[in-house]
Image (cartoon, rainbow, N blue to C red):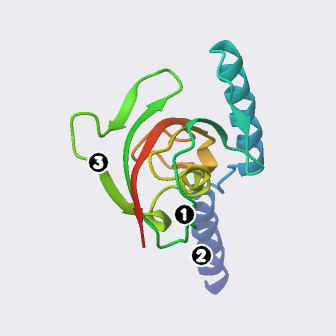
Amino acid sequence: MKSTYLILLVCIAGCFTACFKKDSFDPEAQFRTDTTMIREFVKKNNIPAIKHSSGIFYVISTPGTGAYKYTASTKVTANYTGRLLDGSIFDSTTGKAPVEFPLNQVIEGWQIGVPLIQNGGTIRLIIPSGYGYGNTSQPLPSNSITDFDITITKLRE
């Protein structure tokens, strides 16, 4: 009788284990895929983008003025438009007031790219999904590459 319960318990445990698939997401493979897609996008659209050592791509339209030293707590005020590679806009301050945010509270791609410009500067950031919204499907589809135009209007501690 005890062996029957033991076998039943093992079977139930096996069933529960089978129900939980291991996450097969490979961030390095996704990064390579994103980089290939960004390179194709940049070439197709004649965008003079530079690849940062982190893997984000950027174009500085206007460097801005000053020599501000960014920190994680720097408060940045900016106007921006965020698009997917198909051109669809998913977020924008167009027609609204600029947004203020601490630099350490935005996606990693912004934390890397925004400090490349100064007050009044404009940059385009094409961000691999791992430096953006990642493998989650909120607020964008999983593994979305994002394309931002950002203009810094104010910097302060």
| 79 in relation to 90, above or below | below
The earlier-in-sequence mark between 2 and 3 is 2
Residue indicated by mark 1: 68
Q: Who is closer to the viewer here, 26 or 130?
A: 130
**Secondary structure state at the residue bearing disc 1:** loop
Residue indicated by mark 2: 9
Name the residue located 73 percent from the left edge and 51 percent from the top edge: 54
**Secondary structure state at the residue bearing disc 3:** loop
Which of the 4 image quarters holds residue 128?
Answer: top right
- For marks 2 and 3, give the CA distance: 59 Å
Residue 126 screen position, x and y as percent = 59, 36
The earlier-in-sequence mark between 1 and 3 is 1
Q: Which mark is residue 98?
A: 3
Identity of the residue furthest to the left in this view: 96
Identity of the residue furthest to the front in this view: 66
Name the residue located 72 percent from the left edge and 43 percent from the top edge: 31
- For marks 1 and 3, give the CA distance: 19 Å
Residue 157 screen position, x and y as percent = 42, 73
| 44 in relation to 150, above or below | above
